[in-house]
Image (spheres, rainbow, N blue to C red):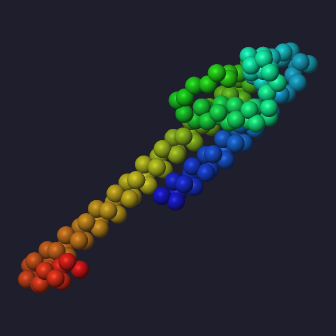
Amino acid sequence: SMSIFKMVVGVATLNHFIACGWYGVGILDLRDIGVEHTWVQALERNSGDHLTIGYRYTTSLHWSLTQFTPASMEVVPKNYIERIFSIAVILIALVMFSSFVSSITGAMTHLRGLQAAQRRQADNVMTYINNNKLSMELGNR
């Protein structure tokens, strides 16, 4: 269970850094290479307001988390630089999410194995007590 907690913290930390990278790509001035629009500009245009850094960060984090899950998001890449970043993140997320699910499955299998061993041990003790006609008081301990 502690290893699962560590994995969740690791995924959350990775998503924080990916969110910061996504925001960084969204605020780059790329007009000199022909890039006119970014996801940050589109978000501000759609909202009609200047958005706070907190809103921008949580939007970036939301975007990052959706790359790791089958969720959707209204924020999408608006230029080829953002699309390249997005593709790289999706490839990383594919590997990370698969590893995360595999680790959780392994941890659950291990826990079930421990429970089965404990049940077998208790059954063996009861069989021994019954076969050797020991007192039930001893068996209940």
**With 19 as the anchor, is 137 left or right in this view?**
left
- Where is residue 71 drawn, in percent x and y? 55, 29
Residue 133 image offset from top left, x and y in percent = 8, 83
Total numbered circles = 0
In the rendered structure, the answer to whether residue 136 lies left or right of residue 111 reads: left
* For residue 98, above or below residue 119: above
Vertically, is 129 above or below 31? below
Q: Which quarter of the rendering shows the C terminus?
A: bottom left
Query: Is 99 left, or right, of 83 in this rendering?
Result: left
The answer to whether residue 14 is visible is yes
Query: What residue lies at 61% left-to-right and 51% top-to-bottom?
Result: 9
Q: Quadrant of residue 51?
A: top right
- Outermost residue, right direction? 32
Decide: is 65 above or below 50: below
Report which quarter residue 12 is drawn in: top right
Instruction: Indicate the position of residue 69 as horizontal and vertical percent values.
Output: 54, 33
Residue that sits furthest to the front in the current view: 49
Q: What is the x, y in percent for residue 117?
A: 29, 66
Asked if 27 appears above or below 113 in the picture, the reply is above
Give the residue drawn at x 40%, y 53%. Answer: 108
Task: Identify which residue is drawn at 32% across, 62% down.
Answer: 115
Residue in the picture at 23% in, 71% down = 122
